[in-house]
């Protein structure tokens, strides 16, 4: 079984010359825009975690190792998005890398 992202890239490569962007079908066009929106919104909703650490000056309850691993995994996704020229993946995971790294650095500073 393939992951959804893998299937998207297979579809993208198979229809490279015949699948215009933006897609003529309204549903696909809306989905493309929604993916970018969610890709930006996801990291933004993590900002309150950073602000809470700064406000309380405490990293109690924050698993620094987990957030650090998230940042490492983001690097793999960024490489994948770069190799496959998948702009939504690149944008999303660059933002996640910034936010996850900020959580780690802020937590280390206040721990």
Image (spheres, rainbow, N blue to C red):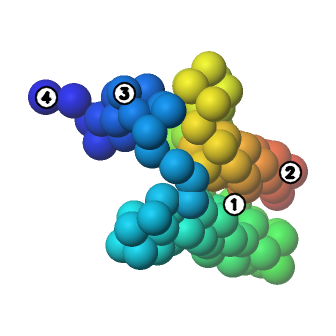
Provide the residue designation for mark 1. 59
- Sequence-wise, the earlier of marks 3 and 4 is 4
In three-dimensional space, the C-alpha distance between marks 1 and 3, rounded to whole angstroms, equals 48 Å
- Pair 3/4: label in front: 3
The relative height of residue 25 versus residue 87 in the rendered view (above or below) is below
Q: Nearer the viewer, residue 42 or 16?
A: 16
Residue 80 appears at what percent x and percent y? 56, 25
Provide the secondary structure element on which disc 3 rests.
helix
Question: What is the crowding at mark 1: few (fewer than 14 residues within 10 Å), some, or many (at least 20)?
Answer: many
In the rendered image, the residue lying farthest to the left is 1
In three-dimensional space, the C-alpha distance between marks 3 and 4, rounded to whole angstroms, equals 18 Å
Residue 54 appears at what percent x and percent y? 83, 71
- The disc at residue 1 is 4
Provide the secondary structure element on which disc 2 rests.
helix
Q: Residue at x 21, y 30 (%)?
A: 2
- Sequence-wise, the earlier of marks 4 and 1 is 4
């Amino acid at each position: 079984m393939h992951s959804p992202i893998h299937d998207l890239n297979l579809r993208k490569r198979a229809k490279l010359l015949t699948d215009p962007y933006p897609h003529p079908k309204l549903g696909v066009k809306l989905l493309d825009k929604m993916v970018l929106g969610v890709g930006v919104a996801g990291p933004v909703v993590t900002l309150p975690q950073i602000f809470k650490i700064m406000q309380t000056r405490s990293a109690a309850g924050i698993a620094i190792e987990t957030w650090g691993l998230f940042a490492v995994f983001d690097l793999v996704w960024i490489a994948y998005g770069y190799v496959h020229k998948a702009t939504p993946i690149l944008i999303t995971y660059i933002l996640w890398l910034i936010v996850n790294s900020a959580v780690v650095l802020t937590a280390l500073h206040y721990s």
